[in-house]
């Protein structure tokens, strides 16, 4: 008898809980009743400030972008098939160069080794020279 009473009480509690969680605010659309628990995305200005604080240069455009891609392409043309990825890697590498990375040539080789391309530290050195001439000259 106790088991039946306990089961009935648990079922009643669950029913009330489920009913309370699925309240419909008068809309027929399920998308309207679902609240997102994901944090709101930050604005482009917030992302730009965070990148600047991390030591990353602003994303290059126009001739500057072309020069950065050309410097990367001089090391390995396969690295620029995804231009946005190459530019992001270059900006991150600038932060490493300006942030005093212990082995920037190795860092560049690792950062730019993607899409089946594996670079050596010597390749990383050439990338760093190209980046210093284009995107992130020494201060």
Image: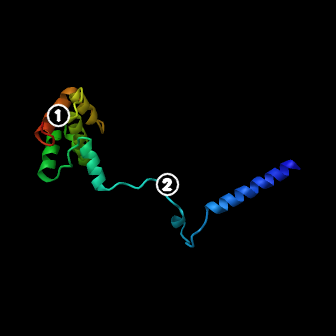
Foreground: disc 2 or disc 1: 2
The disc label shown at residue 128, or none: 1
Instruction: Choose top left, top right, bottom left or bottom right for residue 19.
Output: bottom right
Q: How many marks?
A: 2
Q: Secondary structure at mark 2?
A: loop
The disc, 2 or 1, on the residue closer to the chain's N-terminal end is 2
Q: Looking at the picture, tell me which residue is in the foreground, 120 or 33.
A: 33
Indicate the position of residue 132 as horizontal and vertical percent values: 13, 37
Rendered view: 22 above or below 124: below
Indicate the position of residue 6 as horizontal and vertical percent values: 81, 50
Residue at image coords 23%, 26% = 103
Indicate the position of residue 74 as horizontal and vertical percent values: 14, 38
Residue at image coords 30%, 50% = 47
Q: Looking at the picture, tell me which residue is in the foreground, 45 or 109.
A: 45
The residue beneath circle 2 is 37
Q: Secondary structure at mark 1?
A: helix
**Horizontal side, residue 125 vs residue 18: left or right:** left
Residue 81: tell me if it is visible.
no
**Horizontal side, residue 74 vs residue 88: left or right:** left
**Horizontal side, residue 56 vs residue 9: left or right:** left
């Amino acid at each position: 008898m106790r088991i039946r009473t306990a089961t009935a009480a648990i079922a009643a509690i669950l029913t009330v809980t489920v009913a309370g969680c699925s309240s419909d605010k008068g809309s027929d659309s399920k998308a309207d009743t679902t609240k997102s628990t994901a944090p709101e995305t930050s604005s482009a200005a917030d992302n730009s400030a965070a990148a600047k604080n991390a030591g990353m240069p602003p994303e290059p455009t126009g001739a500057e972008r072309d020069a950065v891609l050309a410097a990367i392409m001089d090391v390995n043309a396969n690295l620029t098939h995804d231009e946005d990825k190459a530019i992001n890697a270059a900006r991150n590498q600038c932060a490493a160069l300006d942030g005093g990375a212990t082995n920037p040539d190795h860092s560049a080789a690792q950062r730019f080794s993607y899409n089946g391309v594996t670079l050596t530290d010597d390749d990383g050195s050439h990338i760093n020279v190209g980046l210093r001439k284009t995107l992130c000259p020494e201060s």
